[in-house]
Image (spheres, helix red, strand yellow):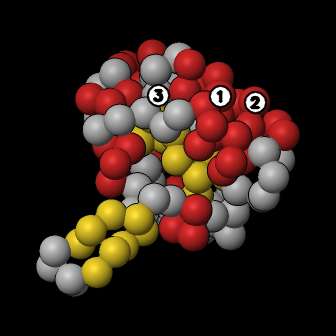
Amino acid sequence: MIDEYIVALRYLRSGLSVIPIQTDGTKRPAFNVLPEVCCLKARRQKRTWDPFKYRHASEGEVLEWFCWDDRAIGIVCGSISGMLEVIDFDDGSLFEPWKYLAGSIVDRLPVVSTGGN
């Protein structure tokens, strides 16, 4: 838990937008700790990660999310995180054909294999 907090804080300080996600391999946000916002469509308050598309979490929020409970770190892509982009292959067998088609650019990209489904 403390390790996730330290890593999340480093990501935040480097300009990335971080959010807490479930540790069950689903990569779903940890909605129970995210802020509530008014959802006009549903006519009720709703917990969402949407604010972190437009603002970075505070260091206090990062402390609350990652220091005490078992949560993984999600990073919000796009302009909030310096135009970060991620290609996620849910079916790992598709990576090699994509790598062949993408050509030499792949050699300059970080590639990570996660323990997800």
Say which label, 3 or 1, has the lower sequence index.
Answer: 1
Q: Nearer the viewer, residue 73 or 56?
A: 56
Crowd band around label 3 with a 10 angstrom C-alpha radius: few (<14), some (14–19), many (20+): many
Residue 79 image-quadrant placement: top left
- Amino acid residing under circle 3: Leu
Q: Which residue is mark 2?
A: 6
Q: Residue at x 35, y 35 (%)?
A: 55
Left or right relative to 61: residue 48: left
Tag 1–tag 2 contact (CB < 8 Å):
yes
Residue 56 image-quadrant placement: top left
Say which label, 2 or 3, has the lower sequence index.
Answer: 2
Tag 3–tag 1 contact (CB < 8 Å):
no
Q: Secondary structure at mark 3?
A: loop
Q: Nearer the viewer, residue 71 or 102?
A: 71
- Amino acid residing under circle 1: Leu
Q: Secondary structure at mark 1?
A: helix
- Amino acid residing under circle 2: Ile
Tag 2–tag 3 contact (CB < 8 Å):
no
Q: Residue furthest left?
A: 41
Residue 31: image location, x then y, percent:
52, 67
Location of the C terminus by quadrant is bottom right
Image height of 55 relative to 28, above or below? above
Residue 51: image location, x then y, percent:
34, 48
Q: Which residue is mark 3?
A: 16
User: How many numbered markers are drawn?
Assistant: 3
Q: Nearer the viewer, residue 39 or 88?
A: 39
Q: Which residue is mark 1?
A: 9
